[in-house]
Image (cartoon, rainbow, N blue to C red):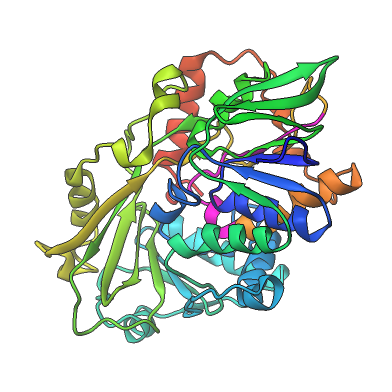
């Protein structure tokens, strides 16, 4: 293990590995460190789907740029990436959400994303297992993609390593040493690395890692789970992802069957403490009844889900913020410490562009665009822990329904 590098990136999920690759591409010496195997924690347990139409114009433009980077991934990195650009359908079953879909189509058009309203029957033709009953409005984005998520972080890490980065798995960070209000070195259980820059991209452990440098980043690790059904004759890879707004649920083709997931009202949240530091995602316990309850809400549109046999039930540990925005930029009070996280269950799909922005910021010394809404210092208020957890819960519970 090298004893000095330009940048240490902590966490090898999609965000950390993307950052490491883009830093290496810019000529920086990088060490990518993870307490587990590379890309093994939450990222491979994600849904692996994109949605280019977001809550804001800026996020919609970033999500579009991320899809462009997925399409050009092999050209840029030299690594293979399998994906399906089969589009996505968003369904409304209430007048309120029908209005949201119409507004989203207008926003998409404004941002250069092809989107159009389609009839319930057209939605059925695109996804035959979808029954059109009860659907008031449907929006279609033909260029959205989905993929098996386990490949992305590993591919970015391999590409970074080929460019000269050192990739260090199964190595826990124990301390970020700060001298004269600036990062000076990182202490791991395998030795020390001198550096003037650290990127905390530790995912569910982001808050704990930031605390090593005396920085408070109030993100909340939150369990999210999904299930994959057995193969079904009517499913193929060219079918789109489907989201049902008021049910807070999503569905897409996966391994010949259907992947189904969603956002319950009372998700299980974890404290960022010593116990979390010792935890790995594979140690988490998940409750399938949560998904069964969510599936029941869409039986009218997807009766195939009723009593369906499963081939996989899995979950990860995304982090939620109080305002639903990501965290990206220099940490307050410590020169050389950068934070990238607060994925809000959507960081995987924009990781190519967020990692690129983080790298550009470090290399140039200034934000590559107006990223003030992602500023880690925006949490400097007097929110209590109870406030933080409740506001993060509300963001999760209304992920689609309140968007």
Q: Is residue 72 left or right of residue 403?
A: right
Q: Which residue lies furthest to the left in this view?
A: 307
Can residue 107 be seen from the camera position used here? no
Residue at 76% across, 41% down: 7
Q: Which of 225 and 283 is in front in this view?
A: 283
Q: How many marks?
A: 0
Q: Nearer the viewer, residue 168 or 244?
A: 168
Residue at 62% across, 41% down: 325
Can residue 4 be seen from the camera position used here? yes
Quarter assignment of residue 253? bottom left
Task: Answer whether residue 6 is magenta in the image.
Answer: no
Q: In this view, does 57 lie to the left or right of 172?
A: right
Residue at 72% across, 69% down: 110
Q: Which of 37 and 222 is in front in this view?
A: 37
| Residue 128 % position (x, y) | 27, 83
Q: Nearer the viewer, residue 139 or 72?
A: 72
- The stretch in magenta equals 336-350
Q: Is residue 391 left or right of residue 332?
A: left
Location of the N terminus by quadrant is: top right
Q: Is residue 123 left or right of residue 296?
A: right
Task: Answer whether residue 340 is magenta in the image.
Answer: yes
| Residue 38 % position (x, y) | 50, 50
| Residue 328 % position (x, y) | 70, 40
Quarter assignment of residue 163? bottom right
| Residue 36 % position (x, y) | 45, 41
Whether 119 is drawn above or below 173: the answer is below
Whether 212 is drawn above or below 229: the answer is above
Quarter assignment of residue 303? bottom left
């Amino acid at each position: 293990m090298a004893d000095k590098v330009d940048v240490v990136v902590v966490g090898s999920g999609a965000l950390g590995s993307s950052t490491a690759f883009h830093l290496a591409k810019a000529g920086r010496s990088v060490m990518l460190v993870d307490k587990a195997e590379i890309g093994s924690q939450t990222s491979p347990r994600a849904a692996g789907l994109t949605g280019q139409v977001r809550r804001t114009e800026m996020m919609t433009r970033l999500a579009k740029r991320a899809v462009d980077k997925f399409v050009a991934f092999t050209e840029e990195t030299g690594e293979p990436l399998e994906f399906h650009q089969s589009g996505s359908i968003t369904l409304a079953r209430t007048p309120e959400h029908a209005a949201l879909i119409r507004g989203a189509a207008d926003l998409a058009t404004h941002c250069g994303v092809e989107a159009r309203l389609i009839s319930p029957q057209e939605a059925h033709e695109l996804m035959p297992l979808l029954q059109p009953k009860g659907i008031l409005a449907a929006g279609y984005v033909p260029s959205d993609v989905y993929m098996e998520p386990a490949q992305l972080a590993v591919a970015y890490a391999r590409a970074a390593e080929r460019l000269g980065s050192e990739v260090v798995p199964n190595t826990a960070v124990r301390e970020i040493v700060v001298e004269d209000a600036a990062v000076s070195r990182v202490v791991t259980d395998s030795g020390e690395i001198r550096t003037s820059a650290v990127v905390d991209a530790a995912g569910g452990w982001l808050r704990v890692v930031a605390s090593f440098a005396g920085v408070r980043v109030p993100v909340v690790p939150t369990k999210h789970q999904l299930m994959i059904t057995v193969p079904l004759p009517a499913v193929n890879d060219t079918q789109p992802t489907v989201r049902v707004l008021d049910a807070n649920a999503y569905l897409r083709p996966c391994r010949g069957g259907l992947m189904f997931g969603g956002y319950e009202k009372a998700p299980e949240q974890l404290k960022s403490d010593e116990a979390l530091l010792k935890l790995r995602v594979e140690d988490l316990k998940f409750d399938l009844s949560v998904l069964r309850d969510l599936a029941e809400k869409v039986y009218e549109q997807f009766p195939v889900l009723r009593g369906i046999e499963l081939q996989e039930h899995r979950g990860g540990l995304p982090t939620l913020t109080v305002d639903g925005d990501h965290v990206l930029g220099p940490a307050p009070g410590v020169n050389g410490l950068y934070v990238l996280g607060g994925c809000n269950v959507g960081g995987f799909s924009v990781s190519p562009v967020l990692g690129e922005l983080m790298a550009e910021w470090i290399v140039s010394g200034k934000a590559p665009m107006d990223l003030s809404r992602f500023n880690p210092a925006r949490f400097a208020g007097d929110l209590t822990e109870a406030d933080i957890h409740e506001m993060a819960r509300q963001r999760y519970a209304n992920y689609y329904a309140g968007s």
